Amino acid sequence: MPLTERPAVEARDLRRTFRTKQGVLRPTRKTVEAVKGVSFEIAPGELFGLLGPNGAGKTTTIKMLITLLIPTSGSASVLGHDVVADVREVRRRIGYVFGGDRGLYERLSGLDNLRYFSELYGVPPREQKARIGSLLELVGLTGREGERVEGYSRGMRQRLHIARGLLHDPDVFFLDEPSIGIDPVGARELRATIAGLREQGKTVLLTTHYMFEADELCDRIAVIRSGEIVAEGTPGELKGLVSAGRVLEVETYGVADGVVETSRTLGGVRSVVVEDRGQVQVLVVSCEPGAEVTQAVLGQLGDTRVGRVSHRDPTLEDAYVELVTR
Amino acid sequence: MNRLRQQVVCFWLQLKILLFSPFEGFLAVVFPLMFATAALLVYQVNGDPAAMLYAGIGAAAMGIWTSQTVSATTLVQRERRAGTLELVVAAPTPFSLVLLPITFAMATIGLYSVVATILWDRWLFDIALHVANWPLFVLSILMATVTIALFGFLLSVTAVRYRTSWALGAALEYPGWLLCGFVVPLDLLPAVLRPLSWALAPTWAVEGMRAAAAGESPWSDLAICGAVGLVYAALAAWLGVRLITAARRDATLALT
Amino acid sequence: MTSARIFFIGGLMSYRALFGWMNPWIFVPSLLVSPVCQILLFAYIGRSAGVGTDEFYVIGNALNYAAIPCMFAMTFTIGGERFGQTLGLVLATPARRIPLFLGRSMPVIANGWFVAMFGVVVGSLLLDVDIPASAWPLMALVVAVGSLASTGLGLVMGAINLVYRDGATMGNVLFLVLLIFTGTNVALDDLPDWMAAVGRCLPLTHAIEATRMLADGATWGAVRGLVGTELVIGLVYLAVGLGAIRLFERLSRTGATLDRI
């Protein structure tokens, strides 16, 4: 196999179980299978998305790839280095950033945080200053780097995180829900930064909950549910999984319990979920191609007040919802 | 060369973190200082000057012990809470080399507490240290600091694995003060505890401090002290690799 | 009726909610091993200095250590809510404040009492201190009064914690103040006058003295005054604490200090 075709990240049947213990006097042990045989490949320079609900095993998968967790079974490699055997080689070549505002030394300035991690990543002293300066510029923190992180806003912390992850110019970048909890403007800037990484030829693995983010950024997406990959493909291909059908949206005021369940059993219905939009609750019904379920669904609603009823084409979000609730 | 620079920069940044912290920067100094005060108040009731000097020298070293045992075991807890533990483990630098400068930053706080206690003793209790050989006395203090730092290093490595290590670490404070003979002559303690005292490097360092103050030779005490310290370091380096691997296997790094 | 429920059930539930992280790995070293070690440390210092008896140090340090659970737990019942950002929710309820906060203090007092009694019993066994069996019931009562007084101080600290965020440091500093000023290791008579005067305004001072007298065979009549003083000191601290909570609650509504953590 020619060298150029070697995947940047390769996971082969990765599994991870956790043992938990509860109670002290009479401990009950439970084994939880967080990741149940996940396999995928990411080509060099590709931006790969891992989507899934909370607790689906996204973070566990990432932590195995970045050497923080040892897989229970299966194997994985990053740029050809095994994540269990060649720990230091892997660590040298990867960057890791997670969302939220933890993971920084609050009592140090932003600059000192970057200096500390430059040392730990062995960035040559001569290059450090220039490197930190350009990264601060990249994430828009120039001028604020001397302040202690305590006083940073969430968005600033998140950008400092990105800078920290890029310090040693890693070839492969792992971003675990980086946009969580930042405002729309900050999220848009973050997306631009991530897109910039791909343009530089970096390989990126991104997990996110935001479908438009994945749709906009990712070359390929894998949807993970309860520790298993249930679908994989380009955003277009995933939409295609449901695009043969249509989506019916019914605005209701106070949908009764049980309607969702009974509607799911109707002929021609693939999935039903309820979305809250302000005062109204929207019943989102994904249907088989050609199926006409509008009257049947309205019949299920009985006396419930109904607002606008509409049809539309499926989005990536519909595909995702269908995949993870099926 | 780069490694040395790394250690120095990390030491300096970690010292900054400690100095800004009310816990490590303030309490780790004040807590042993007040216990030293309480101990000296007891000695003062009879007012025997020889006993006061004995206790005054030992009391000065109490702070090094606190700054290490308590801070070292809360260190990992602190990194966990901040969410940085995983990040430093994920860095290519071996974890023991991440911990080493932190331990020395703590030792520096401990050293500061020695000076503070000596001045405090003098101001509050009029204990003037009659030290026959100052260079050797200072050397003994430095030996105490370094070996206790190595002990703290060993503790902090062990603490990675256990979530509640901070509580165990805090519980080491009083026994250490007693067993190292800081303010109580070891002859008074039950004989069964003697081997424990001998295994603690500060015991020897404090003996060295007293010998240097009295004008005797501290070299034999300091040699044993250094040897015990090296054992700590070797043990810590060995455990460091094993425990981090175990933490990766059992997923205990991220637990808060 | 509602207030009674808030006092008993609310107190117990909030204790469990806020101290869910407590487990034997924390409780045993910090609340059982450490007090015994503190007793041993000072008993040996006393032996080395030729000052006081073992019994003197056992009682002094065991009671002194009760201040740790009492003050920290009480501070934490308020400070912990601030960290969990639930304090605003609790204060938004119409529940009456006195049963609300006093209910929280009951489990704290019980905990402090247990820690102090454990220290006295184990310390006496280890150091071969002989305390007559007849003295124990009254000693237990006096220790309970001392725990109540420390909890009162804890409530004041909890109130301060509403406006000053570093409750843990404050608690440690106060513990050190109690260690030195309450006659834990040096009888008040042997302390400089100003220190003894400060000591007489603090919780535990009178309880420690009364417990020592009881262990030496004193009758209830001899210690009644001391115990009464301790109780009054405790109630004053509780009242000050409740008043301060009320004041800071009002201030925080104008100055929005509660939600800052």
Image (spheres, coloured by chain):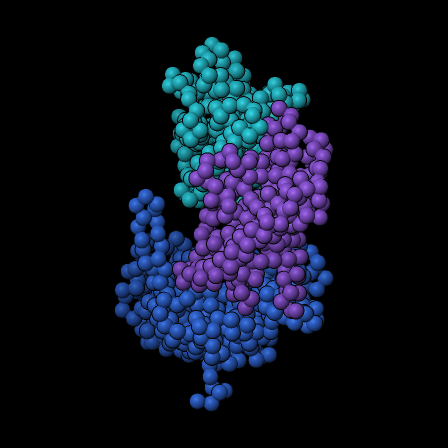
A112 with respect to A90 (left or right): right
Residue A4, placed above or below residue B112? below
Q: Residue furthest front?
A: B216
- Residue B92 x/y as whole percent: 54, 68
Q: Residue at x 64, y 20 (%)?
A: C197
Residue A200, placed above or below residue C170? below
Q: Quadrant of the C terminus of chain A?
A: bottom left
Q: Residue at x 39, y 53 (%)?
A: A254
- Residue B201 x/y as whole percent: 55, 48
Q: Residue furthest bottom?
A: A2
Instruction: Report how many numbered discs are placed on residues in the image.
Output: 0
Q: Residue furthest top?
A: C221
Q: Quadrant of the N terminus of chain A?
A: bottom left
Q: Is residue C160 visible?
A: no
Chain C, which colour? cyan
Residue A122, placed above or below residue B143? below
- Residue C246 x/y as whole percent: 57, 30
Chain that is coloured blue in the picture: A
B71 or A55, which is in the foreground? B71
Chain that is coloured purple in the picture: B
Q: Is residue C132 visible?
A: yes
B226 or A298, which is in the foreground? B226
Quarter of the figure with residue B84: bottom right
A199 or B5, which is in the foreground? B5
A305 with respect to A133 (left or right): left
Residue A295, placed above or below residue C112? below
Q: Residue at x 58, y 28 (%)?
A: C49
- Residue A9 x/y as whole percent: 46, 76
Q: Residue at x 40, y 42 (%)?
A: C24
